[in-house]
Amino acid sequence: MENRRSQRHDKNRKMNRVYNVLIAVVAVLIVLIAGTMFMNGKDDKQSTTANSDQKSANVQNDKSNSDEDNAEQNKDNESSDDSSTSDSEDEATDDSSASDSEDEDQVATNDGEDESSNDAEEEKSSKEDDETATKEEDNEDEKEDSSSADSSKEEIKENKEKEAGSHTASYDKGSSDWNAQLQAVSGATGVSTDDMTVLWLGRNPGGTVGSESQATIKSKSTGEQYKVQIRWVEGEGWQPIGTEKVN
């Protein structure tokens, strides 16, 4: 029993030593890494400070150079201004003398232009009057032409109404005029309305509008087809004017 205990105790000591060694190694690594990071950060700060100092020195040098250039340019401008002032004074005296003579010429020219402009305005007003009179005459002629055209249209309309009479055909299925037209077709073909199939009923293409119709019908019992033209007669109603057997 004592041997076992001593063996366990020895094992525990060995394990503790191993753990202590590992902890020491880890601590050393941490210190080394921290020191390396600190040194790198310090070097970066130093390099940044040096760059900023260099930039400020460059800026100051550029500023001093620009100040010197501006001073020299101002001197040149002052000398050029003095020379230009003297030249402008000489030109002003010359211009004043020339302007006096130009004013005299301008007065004479303006008088001549006023007279010519008055003549031009008179000619323009006379032309406008002539154009206005011409337009009025053209408008009167157009009105007369349009009135004559309207009167001719009304005459044509009245003649058509006279030809068609007062009756207007109705092609609404089931209406009284529709049924009256079928009765006339039945009288012309001998096919009763009950035995009749209406294939088409409408205005006669070659007849008078409103008073002539054309129908195409078929007999349900015999199958025969007929084409019939009918006309409205005042006082007599729809009357057949032509019958044709299709088949």
Image: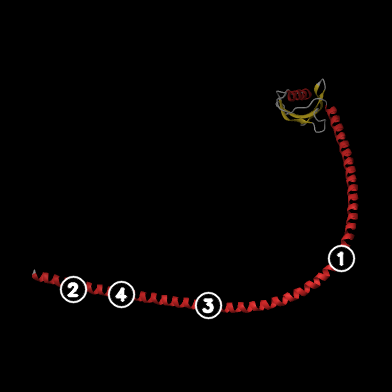
Amino acid at pointer 3: Gln
Tag 1 and tag 3, C-beta contact below 8 Å? no
Tell me where residue 36 appears, x and y as whole percent.
Answer: 35, 76
Residue under the point 84% across and 65% down: 103
The residue singled out by tag 2 in the image is 14
Tag 3 and tag 2, C-beta contact below 8 Å? no
Earlier in the chain: of badge 1 and badge 2, it is 2
Q: Quadrant of residue 43?
A: bottom left
Q: Helix, strand or loop at disc 3? A: helix
Q: Where 127 sits versus 77, above or below?
A: above
Q: Comparing marks 4 and 1, which lies closer to the viewer? A: 1
Between the residue at mark 4 and the residue at mark 3, the CA separation in whole angstroms equals: 44 Å
Tell me where residue 192 appears, x and y as whole percent.
Answer: 73, 22
Q: Helix, strand or loop at disc 4? A: helix
- Give me the disc on residue 60: 3
Between the residue at mark 3 and the residue at mark 2, the CA separation in whole angstroms equals: 70 Å
Residue under the point 49% across and 78% down: 54
Q: Quadrant of residue 230?
A: top right
Amino acid at pointer 4: Val
Amino acid at pointer 2: Lys
Tell me where residue 182 appears, x and y as whole percent.
Answer: 75, 25
Amino acid at pointer 1: Glu
- Give me the disc on residue 104: 1
Q: Where 7 sits versus 110, above or below?
A: below
- Residue at the outermost top position: 235
Q: Helix, strand or loop at disc 2? A: helix
